[in-house]
Image (cartoon, rainbow, N blue to C red):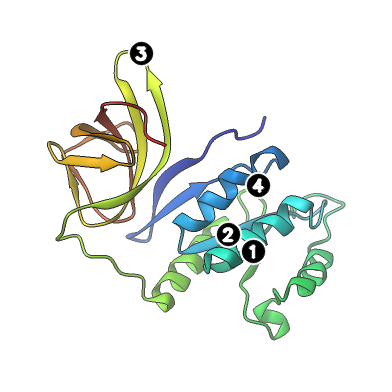
């Protein structure tokens, strides 16, 4: 199947936390990819080694550049017999994305998600890239964040996935999101665990909206 929404989750890599915002790659979801690019610090563009650069890949590169974020590339499906990762690298040079191993400035990594090859190394490279970019946020201030997705649910009413980008959001805090407003009734992390607070770079499900926000 295909991803039809933006998912957000946090993983632990050697004691460092990375938050992923996973946008759909399918052609019909251009607006979600554009929105995802504006929320991130590093864009990891995933290209299938047997397909090469597709129109969605070109568009994802364009969105990442427009958002001014650092681009990394993961060439997936390298376990397939017809995989041509070096052909993908060659195609990427047209977009001025040149592998560090070829004398460029872009981290390009061969992986196989299915066989779980190269994925751990990709995570470590992400942590390294984040350290080099010196990404920082201040947890000791009022929270600011972005609505990733929102829906009207049975039982909980309007809920939203929120990415906290600065400050700390706590249960009981009043908030404003466009036309919507409310007070945080509950915070839930990506694994369904109930929280009392959420700091920078943390995606949480928030309840307590008077209406679904944009």
Mark 2 or 3, closer to the camera: 3
Decide: is 71 above or below 115.
below
Name the residue nearer the viewer: 3 or 37.
37
Tag 1 and tag 2, C-beta contact below 8 Å: yes
Q: Earlier in the sequence, mark 4 or mark 2?
A: 2
Left or right for 3, reference 39: right
Q: Give the image quarter of residue 83.
A: bottom right
Q: Secondary structure at mark 3?
A: loop
Mark 1 or 3, closer to the camera: 3
Mark 1 to mark 3 CA distance (whole Å): 40 Å
According to the image, label 2 marks what residue?
Answer: 44
Mark 2 to mark 3 CA distance (whole Å): 35 Å
Q: Earlier in the sequence, mark 1 or mark 4?
A: 1
Q: Earlier in the sequence, mark 4 or mark 3?
A: 4
Q: Secondary structure at mark 1?
A: strand
* Image quadrant where one finds the N terminus: top right
Left or right for 5, reference 15: right
Q: Earlier in the sequence, mark 1 or mark 3?
A: 1
Q: Give the image quarter of residue 104.
A: bottom right
According to the image, label 1 marks what residue?
Answer: 73
Name the residue nearer the viewer: 53 or 50.
53
* Residue at x 36% of width, y 28% of height: 212
According to the image, label 4 marks what residue?
Answer: 115
């Amino acid at each position: 199947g295909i991803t039809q929404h933006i998912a957000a989750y946090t993983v632990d890599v050697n004691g460092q936390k990375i938050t992923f915002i996973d946008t759909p790659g399918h052609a019909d979801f251009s607006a979600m990819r554009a929105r995802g690019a504006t929320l991130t610090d590093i864009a990891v563009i995933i290209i299938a080694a047997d397909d090469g650069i597709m129109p969605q890949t070109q568009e994802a590169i364009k969105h990442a550049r427009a958002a001014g974020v650092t681009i990394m590339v993961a060439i997936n499906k390298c376990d397939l017999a017809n995989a041509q990762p070096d052909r993908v690298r060659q195609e990427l040079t047209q977009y001025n994305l040149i592998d560090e191993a070829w004398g460029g400035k872009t981290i390009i990594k061969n992986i196989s998600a299915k066989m779980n090859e190269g994925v751990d190394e990709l995570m470590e490279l992400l942590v390294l890239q984040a350290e080099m970019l010196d990404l920082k946020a201040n947890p000791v201030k009022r929270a600011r964040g972005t609505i990733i997705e929102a829906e009207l649910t049975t039982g909980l009413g309007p809920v939203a996935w929120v990415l906290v980008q600065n400050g700390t959001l706590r249960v009981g805090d009043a908030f404003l999101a466009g036309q919507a407003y409310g007070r945080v009734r509950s915070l839930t992390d990506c694994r369904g665990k109930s929280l009392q607070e959420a700091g920078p770079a943390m995606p949480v499900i928030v309840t307590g909206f008077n209406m679904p926000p944009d």
